[in-house]
Image: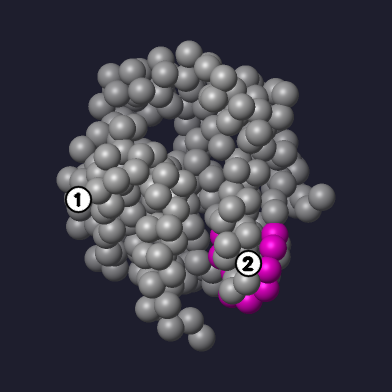
Amino acid sequence: MPYFEYQHQRLFYREQGAGDPLLILHGNTASSALHQGELDYYQSRYRVIALDALGCGQSARVEQWSDEWWRDYGMQGAALLGHLDATPTIVMGTSGGAIAALWFAALYPALCYAVIADSLVRHQPPQKFRDLVVNNRAERNAGQVAFWRDAHGDDWEQVVDADNQIMMAVAERGGDFLQGCPLEDIQCPVLITASRADALLTEVGQQTITLADSIPTSRVYLHHEGDHPLMWSQPRAFRGVVDAFIHSLNLP
């Protein structure tokens, strides 16, 4: 099983295919195990690498997560790519992984060829966190439990509880996921995608456009159907626009 050491902790990753590197960053309470469809789809053209964030999936567990989880996950991705000598790379993230991908691009411009950021917003009102994140997760219905168990194994509750804590920390500081992120420093092309019907995100259409305004190199794709995330709710539409975006990059 492929692991590498990051700050004295073992992080797990999956790797398939050959060619230009494509790094996949999972969302909150997810893991690389849930991105097998993306690994299989892109492996014929790219060296696809999917990383389990510290505390998630098959990576090492930690007692308490940093409330800078998204920035730290981007930093972990950069460390993995350096370990694999796989830069510059295209970074694809969904939900929380999309936020981490933007952090990656802002912090490591020389390592990032392009970003695909799916199903994210910059701000969530604190009450939205409580209603749609914490309270919704508290139901722990059969579908949720199956998702989390597939992602993390039998100790999934520890992961969800730790993630709830960092979500509430963000809510307490005003609900800004990208606080402190120098978006204006992003130099590479960025594709931002979302479903306008996403029930988890607040004012997703307007927020997507506002976020794009902060990143001069960005372009936007909003789909009328689907839910959260677009990557999984409308995979054909998502993959079609991503394929066209990557083709437009004229990779060397």
Q: Quadrant of residue 136?
A: top left
User: Image quarter for residue 172?
Assistant: top left
Give the mark nearest the N terminus, 2 or 1: 2
Segment colored magenta: 15-23
Identify the residue at image location x=21%, y=38%.
203
Dot 1 amino acid type:
Thr
Circle 2 or circle 1, nearest the eye: 2
Residue 234: give x, y in percent of width and height.
40, 50
User: Is residue 16 highlighted in magenta?
Assistant: yes
Which residue corresponds to mark 1? 210
Please tell me which residue lies in front, 199 or 133.
199
Instruction: Residue under label 2, please give it.
Output: 43
Instruction: Check disc 1: other Cα within 10 Å, few if <14, some if 14-19, many if 20+.
Output: few
User: Please, what is the dominant secondary structure of the magenta stretch?
Assistant: strand
- What amino acid type is highlighted by mark number 2? Gln
The quadrant where residue 52 appears:
top right
